[in-house]
Amino acid sequence: MPLPSAIDACRTDLFTPEEELRERYPAAFAERILRIRDMYNYWLANPAIKDRQLRDQIMSRYDVSQSCAYSDIAIIHQIAPMMQQNSRDFHRVRYNEMILETYAMAKARKDTKTMERAASSYAKYNRVDLEDEMAVPYDEIVPQPFCATLDVTVLGLPAIPNVYEHIDKLTKELSRDFADITDVDFEEVDLEEEKIFPDKAPDLQTPPES
């Protein structure tokens, strides 16, 4: 089986355990995925870093060429939006970095008001004022997927034999007994607001016809 492209492999296996990566891919290919993972996490922790600084980090950490480093950076830029859609970690880190940088600059200027606002924002965003058991990780709540089904066994009930015939039979029985609700004509709603809300504000009253 041919190897996928580096970008496709990173999209599916960037955070796959190292042992599985080495079993799934040739050594050099697995090493590259691990290298990109490491530098993606480094970039995530340092969102203000320039590409040339990231290039230098890759070259110094892994002793690779400049072209190889830029190739890794290109992959990081491509996978970043996808990762950000599935995780708020990037935005959390970036927000905290910005707040901490603001605090540091305010501290250097001895601007205590800005320091206080930055500290308050940091505490509120990270929910440090809440008890651990009260802090609800809303971003980690996965909506329960529901699918319509005629299979009542999913509720622990015995299966209905010939379910479609049962539905047709029940529909006919109900239609015969309650024919007046099978087809209901549209009727204008008459709320008689003047009687229900006699004390409503004058400016809400319906103006008289001329």
Image (cartoon, helix red, strand yellow):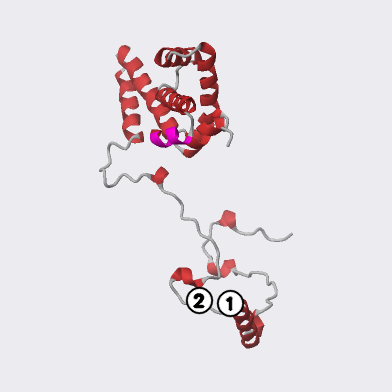
Amino acid at dot 1: Val
Whole-percent x and y of residue 129? 27, 38
Q: In the image, is 191 to the left or to the right of 141?
A: right
Asked whether the viewer can see residue 67, the reply is yes
Q: Which mark is residue 163?
A: 1
Residue drawn at the location 68% of the way across and 60% of the way down = 208
Q: In the image, is 43 to the left or to the right of 105?
A: right
Q: Quadrant of the C terminus?
A: bottom right
Q: Which residues are magenta?
A: 19-24
Q: Which mark is residue 159?
A: 2
Task: Give the vertical position of 138 relative to 45 (above or below).
Answer: below
Do labels 1 and 2 touch, CB within 8 Å? yes
Q: Residue furthest bottom?
A: 177
Disc 1 from disc 2: Cα separation: 9 Å
Whole-percent x and y of residue 81? 53, 32
Q: Residues within 10 Å of mark 2 (few under 14, many from 20)?
A: few
Q: In the image, is 127 to the left or to the right of 187?
A: left
Amino acid at dot 2: Ala
Q: Residue furthest right?
A: 210
Nearer to the camera, 208 or 145: 145
Nearer to the camera, 17 or 144: 17
Nearer to the camera, 197 or 52: 52
Q: Residues within 10 Å of mark 1 (few under 14, many from 20)?
A: few
Q: Would you identify the image quadrant in which residue 135 lies?
A: top left
Residue drawn at the location 52% of the way across and 33% of the way down = 9
